[in-house]
Amino acid sequence: MSEFEGKKLLILGGNPETTPLVEIANSMGIKTIVTSLRHTDPAKKAAWKAADVDGMDVPGLIALAREEAVDGVLVGVADILVPSYCKVCDALNLPCYATKEIVDVFSFKDSFKATCERYGVHGIPEYYLDADMKPEDVEKIKFPVMVKPVDNGGGVGMTVCYSKEDLPGAVKKALDASNKKRFIVEKYMECDDMGMYYTFKDGAVSASCIYDRYTTDEQKGLSRVCLGGTYPSKHIDEYFERMHDGAVRLFKDIGIKNGVLMLSGFYEDGEFYVYDTGFRLQGEAPHLLMKAIHGFDQREMLIRFALTGSEGDLDLLKEDDARLRGKYAATLWFLLKAGTIGKIDGLDEVEKDPCVVANIQRLYENTEVLKEWIGNEKQVLTRVYIVCDSKKELCDKLTEFQAKVKVTDTEGNDMLLRGFDPKKALEM
């Protein structure tokens, strides 16, 4: 019998990316309860029990947790729910890897950027603008710029503006997507995109993955949704030389002891610029590659922490390795245009390849891809996770898989956006 057999775990959020977390908890003998506002959320289908309490409704969540007599609470894959997670755990005196001080830094892009600067971790240059859009402020802006809410992610509420005429609609979109009704205007960066993924255990800090990300440029005016990533980054040595130490000082000073955290950043002319963060498991799920290469599972660690206050006996600094023990890895995302999915070909064959360690599919045949999904991660069909022994093998697999997968709508039209160029990405 599992040591957690029969324990109850409340998981906040029901999006597709939270489903694997639920499944791992189920496999540990845990009774999972997934709650979110939408009755049809995918992660609920995998849970022992589902509830329709909104993840932002803290009193409702506390009442639900007490009614179910849960043994632990955990946030799924949604930044916006981390503050709720912290408040619910605090009210019930249950283990929580976040604190109010940490949440205050990471929940809002503007306060996060200000904190980072104190440690030499630079944010993207930005322009002052408020909802009144005063002409004297607008005149100082050099286009293109990105307008985005301070408290949302995944491309939601974000717009690229190429002229001042684009600003009113972009500001309205950002404010509509912001609970705090705040937005920021940043220089639109057209350079190398990166992810820096950290693991924390009992105060120890490890950079688990440093990788390069590739985004689509087909959707003009919208946030550039990810097409995939390659591991380790071509800039990994320079990152450790220039930015890693400052990031670690930041993490330690604000009190992070346990958990997982993503920094998203750009690399331009020898400098790194951080543009986003997430103090929780990521939708793009680097932990799946880490499990395949290192053998430890961050999901299990977080579940264990939620129920016991400890992430277990793992020697993090010994077992973790940002250089992936000499292997090469990638995530390959397939993005869809708006329409109704008629047929998906080739994905089953790709999933059976021995280099593929996971395939996290979000959308299926007969699903309608709504226009409002375009420009954020809701347009992702699936994410494929690949581990290879050499850079050449990885390049070949990425090329092969992108050629194999075909998606057409109910009228027979191609629904797939172009992928990224593996040879260019891997500098082959």
Image (tube, grey):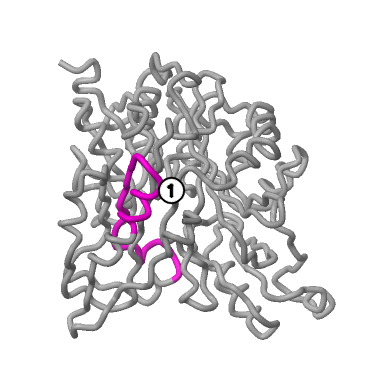
Residue interval drawn in magenta: 375-398
* 227 lies left or right of 241: left
How many numbered callouts? 1
Identify which residue, 249 or 8, lies in the foreground: 249
Identify which residue, 69 or 389, lies in the foreground: 389
Residue beneath the point at 35% across and 59% down = 333
Q: Is residue 391 magenta?
A: yes
Residue beneath the point at 22% across and 27% down = 30
Question: In the rendered image, which quarter is residue 166 located in?
Answer: bottom right
Secondary structure of the residue carrying numbered label 1: loop
Neighbor class of circle 1 (other Cα within 10 Å; few <14, some 14-19, many 20+) is many
Question: In the rendered image, which quarter is residue 302 located in?
Answer: top left
Is residue 14 visible in the rendered image? The answer is: no
Q: Determine whether 27 is above or below 78 in the image.
A: above
Could you tell me the amino acid type at mark 1? Ala
Is residue 250 visible in the rendered image? The answer is: yes
Q: Is residue 255 magenta?
A: no
Identify which residue, 354 or 262, lies in the foreground: 354
Q: Determine whether 293 is above or below 3 in the image.
A: below
Residue beneath the point at 30% across and 52% down = 384
Give the farthest residue toward the right: 136
- Percent position of residue 165, x then y: 67, 85
* 196 lies left or right of 369: right
Q: Determine whether 273 is above or below 323 in the image.
A: below
- Percent position of residue 74, x then y: 38, 34
- Percent position of residue 240, x then y: 64, 36
Q: Determine whether 191 is above or below 99 in the image.
A: below
Q: Which residue is mark 1?
A: 78
